[in-house]
Amino acid sequence: MRKPSIHVHCLAILLLLLDVGSNLCLADADADATASNKANDNNKANDDSTTNSRRLGSNLNLNQGNGPSNKSSEHNSPKPNTIRGAKDRQLQLQDADSMDIALRKRMPAISKDNLKFSYTSEWRQDFFPSGVRSDSPSVSKAPSVSPTKAPSASPSRTPIRIACAGDSLTLGRTGMWNNPGLDYPTQLGGLLGGNPFSTHNYGRNVVTAISSSGQSYNSTSIFRRSLDLGADIYLLMLGTNDARIWESQSHKFATSLEWIINEVKRTSPDVRIMLAIPPWVKMANFGISGSIINNNIRPIIQQVAAAATPQPIHVVDMYAVTKNRYEFYTSDGIHLNGQGYERMAQAWKEAILCNNNGICETGE
């Protein structure tokens, strides 16, 4: 049998291609016809809408008389390609809205106190079950921030007022000058650390405990001011200037000292009083003898303190604290320098903070 020639094969392939192409053209024609029908329907709907709008505008103009006429806007008929693109965009917007609603349902709520939020791994797995890489960094949920309560102010501690009464050794005289800041009351306040303690200097130059000396402490206005303070602790150091008039008025020393103590108790019944034995005298000067202070004034101060009621008064021995400490004194041999007043302040502090067990000597 004779084999078909190559021309027959080529002709068969050509016919096959023509048949496929015709089918494609028919499919495109059907699609174009469908789109054209849809466009005609839309145009008809738009024409109906425009006609209704014009009729409505005419009715409004008739009702309003000579009022301004409302003109309806006219739109050109959309082309098929334009309609297809608009529908695609509308579908995309609908998909985006659906996704946005879903996202809002999944997103954590935002509170007033905490504006931070995060997408948890559970959220990512719900929307991207197979799209999350195992090596992608995890996103942890931001810790919730609870409103912090303002710390309540701690109750203020009850102040402890300390009155420092006495002569120039309390005032802080160094030789011929008074040096504020070097005096023992100021340095005592620093050693006690301030709050709740507050120290007040009521020192006066040349005063005595003896009331008939003409320069007695109890006759001064500064003594009255020390009473007005209403002190919790009253530090009293007198006797150095009494040594000058000891030969003639020594018999009045004890009663004068007791009177000052009783007056302090009368104005401040709960006050804690402390007495000091005056400091050592480096050299006799101004008629002041160290032997009188140590041998005569010391024992009387101790007796007055022990006899006090309802409980004995604390005694601080400043004579023992300063004895033979030449470096504590100025050139006049009576007044101390800043270092000497600091040592006195330290002795007062030890007495204030020691046990309340009657007579409290330094070093106990």
Image: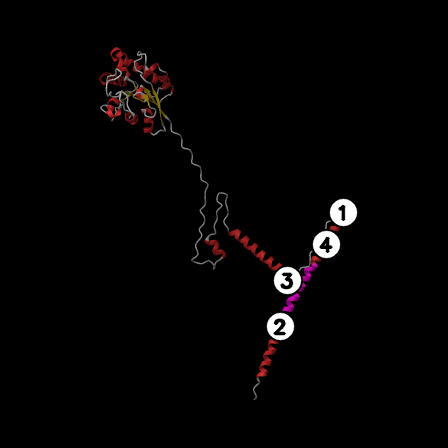
Mark 3 → mark 1, Cα distance in angstroms? 42 Å
Q: Which residue is mark 1?
A: 63
Mark 1 → mark 2, Cα distance in angstroms? 60 Å
Q: Nearer the viewer, residue 253 or 264?
A: 253
Q: Which element type, helix, strand or loop, lies under badge 2?
A: helix
Q: Which element type, helix, strand or loop, lies under badge 1?
A: helix
Q: Nearer the viewer, residue 165 or 302?
A: 165
Question: Residue 182: x and y, percent?
Answer: 32, 25
Task: Determine which of the numbered discs, if any, sits on residue 52 in the image.
Answer: 4
Question: Up-down: is 97 above or below 338?
Answer: below
Q: Is residue 90 left or right of residue 238?
A: right
- Mark 3 against mark 2, which lies toward the viewer? 3
- Residue displayed at 74% across by 53% down: 55
Task: Determine which of the numbered discs, if any, sits on residue 37 in the image.
Answer: none
Mark 3 → mark 2, Cα distance in angstroms? 23 Å
Q: Quadrant of residue 171?
A: top left
Q: Which residue is mark 3?
A: 81
Q: Main secondary structure of the magenta part?
A: helix
- Residue displayed at 77% across by 48% down: 62
Question: Residue 276: x and y, percent?
Answer: 28, 21
Give the magenta range. 21-44
Q: Label 2 is placed on what type of residue?
A: Asn
Sooner in the amino-acid sequence: mark 4 or mark 2 = 2
Q: Which element type, helix, strand or loop, lies under badge 4?
A: helix
Q: Nearer the viewer, residue 286 or 95?
A: 286
Q: Is residue 224 left or right of residue 285?
A: right
Mark 4 → mark 1, Cα distance in angstroms? 17 Å
Q: Label 3 is placed on what type of residue?
A: Asn
Q: Which residue is mark 2?
A: 23
